[in-house]
Image (cartoon, coloured by chain):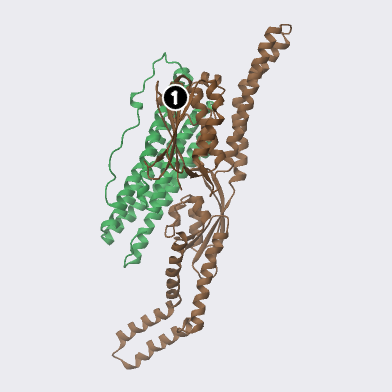
Amino acid sequence: MQSVHIMSAYDEELKFLSKRIAAMGGHAERMVEQAVAALVNADPGLAQKVIRDDVVLDEGQREIDDKAIIIIAKRQPMATDLREIVGAIRISADLERVGDLGKNVAKRVVAVTDGRQPTSLFRGLEALANLALTQLKEVLDVYASRSVDKISFVRDRDDQIDAMYTSLFRELLTYMMEDPRNITPCTHLLFCAKNIERIGDHATNIAETIYYIVTGDQMPADRPKGDKTDKISLSASMPAN
Amino acid sequence: MADRGADDKDVAGTIAARLWNGRWLILAGFLAILAVYFLAGISAYVLVPALAMLLGAALLPAGGAGQSPEDAAAIEAIGLQRLSGEYLAAAVADPLIIFDHAATIVHANASAFAAFGGIAPGISLPLKFRAPEMQALLDSMLSGAVASDVVDYTEKLPVERAYRVSASSVGHGTDLYVLVFKDQSEARRIDRMRADFIANASHELRTPLASIAGFIETLRGPARNDPAAREQFLQIMQNQTGRMARLIDDLLSLSRLEMKPYLKPGTEVDLRQTVDGVIDSLAPLARENNVAIERNFAQGALSVPGDRDELFQVFENLLENACKYGQSGGRVVVSIARGNDGSEPGFDVTIRDFGPGIPEEHIPRITERFYRVDVESSRTQKGTGLGLSIVKHILTRHNARLTIKSEVGKGAAFSVHLPAH
């Protein structure tokens, strides 16, 4: 992957960073997966586990920050190496945020599953989570393979996530208008959906960082904004479907 | 192509192996030269590096010294062993990955490529398999804590798969390790399928069942002696049982698809023939709905890797939807075009209707199970709410993409992008 240095210890240090990033990535993926599973299956035990697991990611980020700063101080890295190290700092920050968002979803499990909700609510959220997780997985796979030519999928996927989020937003508003008793769970679900949508955004950030690490250029910035929830309002007379 | 690459790698590998075999000699020589450099002033000490050199050479196994004919034979034997190792890996049906002490992939067999993709030699294994249990497995193997270990590893996306992964070191002192993935997805999926089937079936079958039960009660009670009402109620009951039967068919076909997430490689599908077949089979339905089907196929060979029956079902579901829900447009255009828009070349099969279209907010959701844009029209058209779920499932297995474009009042276009190889 990386070019070989005279000092093999230096290579080891760089390898350590990327391995640690991968481990954090695996943890973040697992946390989000389990948080959504806990929500869908109404499983507070699993939610508790997710909340506890967040510490691992916080610790991972601190460790990567420390290591990266020591490497910069000790080795005076240039070019690719410097980008690799700064990239690791940025990616670990994004992954830590992904973990926080997963944890936040897990925290809402009890409130949402208090009363039994229609399964269709969760189906939409599950589909959204699948999109976001696929995005995260593909991005981290690119981090392993460094084949940034495939990174264009990120934009498509981001648009899909935004469209799905907009649709879910509308659906949840409809449920709230149907019956005021739905307001509590649906508000929580709305936040869950927002969190998951944010996870997709962090994955996109990571993709941009990887592109920068590998090519030294910024990813061309033509990101159309697909999230149209800022314009949604439902009038009370709208027929529910 | 792949074979050529493997041969090149073999040559490089043999050279590396030779260097590795001579490592002690090289090291001893190096040390001796260093010692001579530092100690040249004092003649008595010259004996020390000379002795060290001798000792280094003596420690080598017999085959390592000099370029004798036996030596060449030994190297050939090593080459043969390596070769047979690769063939052996290829002969294993389960995904198999060989990696070195730095957790870098040395070799992955074809089945591993098919299952995981993007695992070329040189890629770091923990970067690819990021799940915490896999990280722990690799760590314990490489730290030498255990000689072999087994963990259960599940992958949720893009399709759910469960493996029992066993790791062990290869031979003695080779510094190589092997991972073998045993697929357990089937057993897992049977459990899941049962749970899913019961959940979906109980939910969706309850409505028609409740109405049938209600009519039976009426027929035995107030409508007992009313032949006109009886006839009408029996007709409704027949419709409801028909709906239940269709629902069960669709649920079963979806479950069957979920059971086998991969595609058998190597089969080719002629898109022209398949789409023609679909159009012919749906001609009666199109006539019934007063819809004219137009064809617009590209020239030349139109074949993609895939499963003919499954792709037939995809186009059948899409065309059936177009005829039913786009009925008011009076025509449906089916086109096959060479699509080179994205990163991968392939074919786009587009089925376009000119009906009422789909409101934008529903588009991302319509491939979900039982998601209906309009419950009423779905019921009257005998829809089960599963057709597009089935389409999406099949397309995921084909690495294909479904794009839906629609404008309210102008119709909808369902476009399937199938990658060619």
Colour given to chain B in the rendered image: brown
Label 1 resides on the chain identified as: A
Residue B269 location, x and y as percent? 52, 43
> Relative to B58, does residue B254 appear above or below in the rendering?
above
Q: Quadrant of the N terminus of chain B?
A: bottom left
Quadrant location of residue B123? bottom left
Quadrant location of residue A68? bottom left
Dot 1: element: helix
Q: Which residue is mark 1?
A: A171
For image coordinates 43% across by 66% down, the residue present is: B8
Q: What amino acid is found at the position of numbered circle 1 in the picture?
A: Glu
Please give left or right for residue B169 compared with residue B33 in the image.
right
Residue at the far bottom: name it: B44
B324 or B96, nearer to the observer? B324
Chain corresponding to green in the figure: A
Residue B15 location, x and y as percent? 42, 73
